[in-house]
Amino acid sequence: MTLIERLKEFTSNESISMHVPGHKNNTIGDLSDLLTFNFDMTEIKGLDNLHDPVEVLKDLNGFLSNKTPGYFAQAMVNGTTNGILSAIFALSKECQTFVLYGDIHKSIYHALDLVSASYEIITKEELFNYDYSDKALIITSPNYEGNILENISSLVSYVHDRNGYVLVDSAHGAHLSITENFPEAAYLSKADIIVESYHKMLPALTMASVIFVKEERLYNEVMTFINYFETSSPSYLIMASIESAQQFYNNYKDGLFFKRRKKLIEHLNQQGISVKEADDPCKLLLNWQHGPYALEDSLINENIYAEMTTDSGVLFVLPLWHEGDCYPYSQLLDRLERLCLIKNENNQDKDISNLLGKVCVQNVVPYPPGIPLVLKGEIFTEADLKQLQQYLFNHVKIEGIDYNINYYV
């Protein structure tokens, strides 16, 4: 089957999105009214230059920076990974060492590897007991599951008082502070650099991202590396969708969202599905008596697709429901009522026992969420192999596992 055929199959089956991107199969926001393929233009006269914006794209960046007073903003079409790479390369000019805390996405490790930077991983207890002088702290908030790091503003002040920098990977937080009923966004912490994936939680096209930088000098350095890493043929469709998403953010009212969210949670509970709420009201972690992987299979049987499934549960990423949206909410509730246990035959055809005690030669990364389980240079432990076997048993995609297996054959 070709890619186009597979995409047609998904759309013809009327699949329901509980995953990113935030437009949820073009049912949230009004992208279809705003964007046409006629907008797939190039950098001709009158349409400015993303790498040296002086006209309409400069205005776009100014519009984006209104969201985060005191920050310089830059729209990006290569996703948040582009922003992470550029930020780390820019910070490497200022810092000798990087300090990592919490869930760290693989793109951060890739950037540190490319720039040949040394890094240290610290614990929660060390956050406010660490010498950040000439170092850059990298944190993730919110994380994939929607949990927000506590006391970010105090932490940023603590790091700054010790002449350090703070980079916040806020890929899943572009919607925060959208109303007073949502948690505060990372930019309120006054961190030095914040990167947000507009496409994940807001109605924008995939790869739509924005980087916010506090100081002009650092912003100029970041822009140098964005120009290195980002395509020289940026998509005007993506850039237009960023503008549309920001307009959506500015005008959003959350009344319908919380009404539907409450009803959905009640409906799930009635079906025997437990719901764990996160700091971010858009994230729900589901489970039931047969386990998360069986729940995922049963949801897919009804053409309901979640963001990811782990041993902890099935992650739903809720739409930012709004008046006039086209989201199939009633269909979602109806299909949930029809859920029945689907027993798929699981099998684990990879022999990973030989990896015990071996040095990891390539990062081993369950995807999603893209957070390395075993880092290059670490030793495979019994606990690692047990976790990997569980993932493989349940058909979770594991990047790097085949490379490690073949290396030791």
Image (spheres, grey):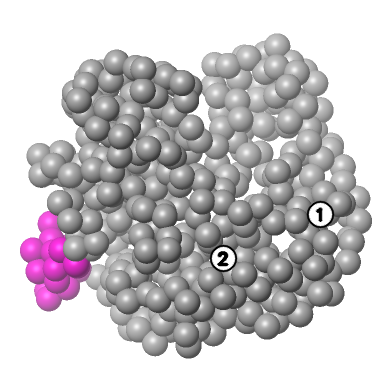
Q: Position of residue 126 (x, y in %)?
A: 42, 19
What is the magenta range?
43-63
Tell me: residue 152, above or below residue 158. below
Q: Residue 366's mark? A: none
Residue for point 67% across, 31% down: 401
88, 350: nearer the viewer: 88
274, 170: nearer the viewer: 274
Residue for point 15% across, 63% down: 62
Question: Which residue position is annotated with label 2?
Answer: 318
Identify the secondary structure beneath mark 1: loop
Q: CA distance from mark 1 to mark 2?
A: 19 Å
Question: Which residue position is annotated with label 1?
Answer: 288
Which amino acid, mark 1? Trp
- Say which quarter of the image contains residue 379: top right
Residue 61 within the magenta-colored segment of the rendering: yes
Q: What secondary structure prevails in the magenta region? A: loop
Contact, mark 1 vs mark 2 (Cβ under 8 Å): no
Q: Is 286 left or right of 393, judged from the image as shown? A: left
Q: Is 14 left or right of 41, judged from the image as shown? A: right
Residue 371 within the magenta-colored segment of the rendering: no
- Say which quarter of the image contains residue 139: top left
- Residue 117 appears anywhere in the view: no
The quadrant the C terminus occupies is: top right
